[in-house]
Amino acid sequence: MADGAGRAEPFGVWATAVGVARVRARETAREQPLFRDPLASAFATAGGIGPGLQSPRADEADEAARRRRLGVVVSIVIRTKFLDDLLDRAVTSGVRQVVLLGAGMDSRAFRMDWPAGTRLFEVDTAEPLDFKAAVLRQEQAVPRCERITVPVDLRDDWPGALAAAGHVPARPTVWIAEGLLIYLPEDAVQLLLERVGALSAAGSRMGLTLGARGVVERFRGDAAPGSAASMWISEMPEDPVGWLDGLGWEAETFTLRERAEAYGRPLRIPPQHDEGPGGLVSAVRAAH
Ligand SMILES: C[S@@+](CC[C@H](N)C(=O)[O-])C[C@H]1O[C@@H](n2cnc3c(N)ncnc32)[C@H](O)[C@@H]1O
């Protein structure tokens, strides 16, 4: 399907990337945003869900459903800031290769400051990358680093595609998997991270977001067909730090609640259930 401008219309899992852009556009419009993403509004508008439009579920009567939706919005804002900071630390430590796995409408190549020599790879399937390219052309957006798109399915031979695109595994890389792993089955998550580990030189770093334990079941009940939550399938293991240790990473996890507080945006809703280990992960490649 294509719209009047010849762009593919958001469909299936990649439509979630446009929903994320909408949240970032709204955050950008706040008086004191945690980040500014000037391209987000153009992505959302091109996808038919401009930030000025009423939220599709704004009329929901069920208070619990409304809270869950707001929870998703807050989690996107907080994780964006968390990973922006992680990337800043990575480049400060000297890393010059960035790989965004499931990049979607992530516009960090355009909105963050990158040292000279930074190469940023955006890995996603062809459709969202084509849609993104059309919007970037329309906005005459100019990247602030060397930006390389890698159209490939992360269940296929993406390491081959990344190597062909110029990624150098012997040099440290900072990897970001933001809002991605929750859409992949557990065995695919495991394989993805094993492959990431095999391509991570000493000094590499990684930022992940993991679905909280129980989140799939909590959201499935009233998830509208085609909505992001209807496609969630995997959650973090019981012991995420131990799991990542086994994969060669020294990881720290943070809860949304704790990060939100640290960023001056304390959550107003008290915990409704045992929130368990945090799903915001910052990891450094363990010394061999
Ligand atoms: C919720 S969006 C998040 C996008 C981006 N990381 C962000 O936070 O703005 C999930 C992204 O993962 C991508 N994705 C999901 N499964 C994928 C797969 N098997 N291969 C490549 N990309 C995938 C989707 O196309 C979509 O762009």
Image: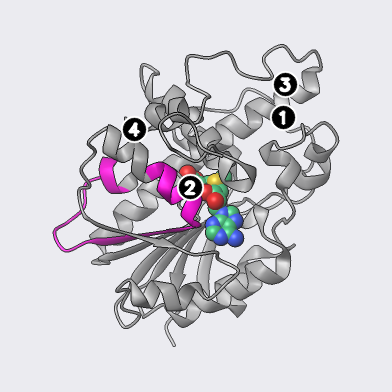
Quadrant of the image for the N terminus?
top right
Tag 1: amino acid = Arg
Q: If you read the primary sequence from the N terminus, does the residue marked by circle 4 or circle 1 appear first?
A: 4
Residue 179 visible in this rendered orientation of the protein = no
Q: CA distance from mark 4 to mark 3?
A: 27 Å
Hey, which quadrant is residue 164 in on the image? bottom left
The residue lying at 67 percent from left, 50 percent from top is 211
Q: Could you classify mark 4 by the number of other residues whose Cα lies within 10 Å: few (under 14), some (14-19), or many (20 or more)?
A: many
Q: Could you classify mark 1 by the number of other residues whose Cα lies within 10 Å: few (under 14), some (14-19), or many (20 or more)?
A: some
Q: Residue furthest right?
A: 221
Q: Is mark 3 within 8 Å of ligand 1?
A: no
Q: Is residue 139 above or below residue 283?
A: above
The residue lying at 44 percent from left, 34 percent from top is 263
Mark 4 or 3, closer to the camera: 4
What span is in magenta? 109-132
Tag 2: amino acid = Pro
In this figure, which residue is indicated by the disc labeled 3?
66
Image coordinates of residue 271 in percent, x first then y, are 73, 33
In this figure, which residue is indicated by the disc labeled 1?
68
Q: If you read the primary sequence from the N terminus, does the residue marked by circle 3 or circle 2 appear first?
A: 3
Quadrant of the image for the C terminus?
bottom left
Image coordinates of residue 25 in percent, x first then y, are 42, 26
Tag 4: amino acid = Leu
In this figure, which residue is indicated by the disc labeled 4?
39
Mark 4 or 2, closer to the camera: 2
Q: CA distance from mark 1 to mark 2?
A: 26 Å
Hey, which quadrant is residue 257 in on the image? top right
Q: If you read the primary sequence from the N terminus, does the residue marked by circle 4 or circle 2 appear first?
A: 4
